[in-house]
Image: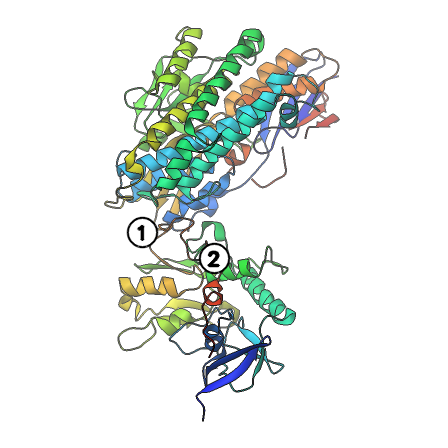
Amino acid sequence: MGQKITIEPVTRVEGHGKVTIHLDNEGKIEQTRLHIVEFRGFERFVQGRPFWEMPVLVQRLCGICPVSHHLAAAKALDVIVGAGTGEGLTPTGEKMRRLMHYGQIFQSHSLHFFHLASPDLLFGVDGDPAKRNIIGVALEHRDLAVQGVMMRKYGQEVIKATAGKKIHGTGAIPGGINKHLTEEEREYLLHGDEYMNIDKMIAWSQDALAFFHEYHKKNKDIIDHFAEFPSSHLSLVRKDGALDLYHGVLRAVDAEGKKILHDVDYQEYDRYIDEEVRSWSYMKFPYLKEIGKQAGWYTVGPLARMNTAEFIDTPLAQKEFEQFKQYNGGKPSHKSMHMHWARLIEILHAAEKMKELLNDSDLMEGELVTKGNKLPEGVGLIEAPRGTLFHHYKIGENDMIKMANLIVSTTNNNQPMNEAVNQVAVKVMTGKKEITEGMMNAVEVAIRAYDPCLSCATHALGQMPLEFEVYDASNSLIEKKLKH
Amino acid sequence: MNQFVRFTIDGTECMATRGQYLVDAARENGIFIPTLCNFPGVKPKGSCRICSVKVNGKLMTACTTPVAEGMNIENESKEITELRKSIIELLFVEGNHFCPACEKSGNCELQALAYRFGIMVPRFPFQFPHRSVDASHPRIIKDHNRCILCKRCIRVITDESGRSIFAYRKRGIGVEVVVDPKLGKQLTEELAQKAMDVCPVGSILVKEKGFNIPIGERRYDKVPIGSDIENLQITKI
């Protein structure tokens, strides 16, 4: 008899999702889907609010990476207030925002690697679920857990110093920033106590990479072959091809690394990218218009950024980047678990960037805001921890928001996550009589590699996270397993 | 007749100039009586009732009651505190007050009072009324969602001839404070800013002015509302 398996809720991801897997009479996988079951409606209810509220209002989409929404909205509004696109701000404005963003990347990636992903690596994909969590990590690998917590704290402190508070601050305003870094804040972040200093953060970022390399050596099968499938990749890159998480031009490469989106100005993103709505998910499916709905999907995020960028402008991260590139033969990596590797390289890059900025006197003095002639429309893009984030606003004549379009990082990864679910389900579940917890976690590991933020992606009303349901060929529910 | 009078607030002996309103008399004695509709320099209205006290056992509004010899005033009794909390909670539920994205957050008197009274969540059901945002004036936005109808702007913001630039429109539950269409042009940049400052909540916003003051530097970020009065060094005569 055919079966439909549903994994709900998906755990150790941000937000609420569900996976359904249909099996035919022979136990072969017929269809897999990652459903996003939240609905929020931000794009609609911001209409009619004053435009300058957007960076503070829209960041409420998320409690994990509000800074990304805060900054993407501020960047879109820079255009509207006539401050240009990214390069137009005062040095203080741009550098304070960059520091905030690197703090965000650092804390969010640390959260993902240490709190969400490390239990799978340390205890195995099918390890004992009672241990396979952050508490298990804290009990058996104390140093690693402390590093994770303290690295996250450091990033949060950087955010507080630049945005006013750790979650949902107000630092970025249209045309710039609302504060300088104080001498006290700078000293605290540069040379703080035992843990709270940037050199310690750089050293721990390198330790995390060393841990990964060691794990990789012993577990090539999972790192190199788990959920591997060809994909195009998209991200912002600096005009000279360097990795740039705050600003740049839009580039996409195909599975072979050939450019398919040629460093275009993101103000015109809607010429190149569209979104498809499918009836079974609240999350849209973006695609490159030129290639079409079927094949135009792409991956964003840390791995995509490693695949689109040509180099990294900080020495330690560049060394790691070279090693990454060499390992993949100079071609884009399509290995889902390499996303963890890429994320760790970015943690190191963010730490190096923060050190550079903390030593820059522009943060302590100089004009905060710049403005010019007002425009009716603006687009702001940023490389959020989970990938390229698009904010697009139009204002009416009374300065009120008339239209808002948000393409969130996780939305960009919708199709890749569905592909990953399919890959893993086919591999671990085909022909199996019983669906074990380990098999369900394997599917979650694949989703987790993308570090999806499902609340953001649906811009959520709903309850927490993956549910597995088993349906027979006549589509009636015969088994349901909940994972909390 | 002696120009000073003696009275007590919650048993503390106080002294003030005869005829002063109770809120002012209390302030001079280092005692905070919360207010919302009241504003220095304009005639008190007593409309919000947040300053209610018991004078010799009778409920009175402290902003409109002149102090008199021998008054026994209850200001922080359980009954009065409960009454004030109820008023604050009712103000929250009858409008749409979403502090997180409000420019006035940290500078808002209603929010500051809620913090001072330890209100985490109102006990009354939210009404979620359908209210509009009027952005038609070139200098300001009037967000009716947040208006508590205190009339401060109507009483304080006037043109050179003393005419109120703001006015009530509609009646009953639908009443709104709007810019008087005939006098709207008189709302200079300076007056617009003053109107925003006078508004105890975030109902009057100067256009394009949002979040310029960082968190931590806002009026009530560091100390609760009223602590400036309570920390006054009082010289007892």
- What's the residue type where badge 2 is placed? Val
- The subunit carrying tag 1 is A
In which quadrant will I find the N terminus of chain B?
bottom left
Mark 2 closeness class: few <14, some 14–19, many ≥20 residues within 10 Å: few
Q: How far apart are the two marked residues, 2 and 1, measured between alpha carbons?
A: 39 Å
Point 37% across, 48% down: residue: A52
Chain under disc 2: B
Q: Are marks 2 and 1 in contact (CB under 8 Å)?
A: no
A134 or A431: nearer the viewer: A134
Q: Is residue B174 above or below residue B119?
A: below
Inspect the image, locate mark 1, and give the three-letter code of the amino acid beneath it. Answer: Glu
What's the residue at 56%, 74% (across, down)? Answer: B52
Give left or right: position of A483 versus B211. right
Which image quadrant is residue A170 in? top left
Q: Secondary structure at mark 1?
A: loop
Q: Which residue is mark 1?
A: A397
Relative to B196, residue A81 above or below = above
Q: Badge 2 is on which residue?
A: B223
Q: Could you tell me if residue B168 is visible in this image?
A: yes
Residue A239's tag is none
Q: Nearer the viewer, mark 2 or mark 1?
A: 2
* Residue B93, image x, y percentages: 57, 60
The answer to whether residue A31 is visible is no
